[in-house]
Image (cartoon, rainbow, N blue to C red):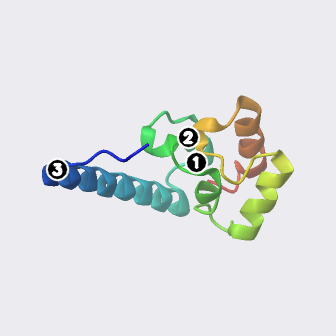
């Protein structure tokens, strides 16, 4: 399937939307790092920016969680590394919150 041909105005609009999403994602990660929001709040959020974020990327936003620890946690819970927040099941969300809830505050 070929990609649609976009006009310059459409390309500019798409670029602006992408920049806004990146900015919101960055703000969310900063709030998590500073402890202004919790992992539970983020996982229960229905915001499209949050929903499309990869779980591994979200976990690495938490204090003292890096790539290796995030991968280990996801393996233990049974979350594929390509999974996005909106694709998590109820049990997976609960397992993440019970495992990391106190670290995310």
Residue pictured at 33% horizontal, 54% vertical? 18
Residue 12: x and y in percent read 19, 55
Between 71 and 15, the one lying in front of the other is 15
Q: Residue furthest top?
A: 90
Label 3 vs 2, first from the N-terminus: 3
Q: Is residue 86 above or below residue 28?
A: above
| Residue identifier under label 3 | 7
Q: Residues within 10 Å of mark 1 (few under 14, many from 20)?
A: many
| Residue identifier under label 1 | 38
Label 3 vs 1, first from the N-terminus: 3
Between 63 and 55, the one lying in front of the other is 55
Residue 84: x and y in percent read 60, 45
Between 96 and 105, the one lying in front of the other is 96
- Confirm or deny contact between disc 2 and disc 1 (CB under 8 A): yes
Using the numbered discs, state the Cα–Cα distance from disc 3 to disc 2 in whole angstroms: 39 Å
Q: Residue furthest right?
A: 76
Q: Residue furthest left?
A: 9
Using the numbered discs, state the Cα–Cα distance from disc 3 to disc 1 in whole angstroms: 41 Å
SS under mark 1: loop
Position of 96 compared to 36: left or right?
Answer: right
State which quadrant residue 71 falls in: bottom right
Residue 20: x and y in percent read 30, 53
| Residue identifier under label 2 | 41
Between 44 and 52, the one lying in front of the other is 52
């Amino acid at each position: 399937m070929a990609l649609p041909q976009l006009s310059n105005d459409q390309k500019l609009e798409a670029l602006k939307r992408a920049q806004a999403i990146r900015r919101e994602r960055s703000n969310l990660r900063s709030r998590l790092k500073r402890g202004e929001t919790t992992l539970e709040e983020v996982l229960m959020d229905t915001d499209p920016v949050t929903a499309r974020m990869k779980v591994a990327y979200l976990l690495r936003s938490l204090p003292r969680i890096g790539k290796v620890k995030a991968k280990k946690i996801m393996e233990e819970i049974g979350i594929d590394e390509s999974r996005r927040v909106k694709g998590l099941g109820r049990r997976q969300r609960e397992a993440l919150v019970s495992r990391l809830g106190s670290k995310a505050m």
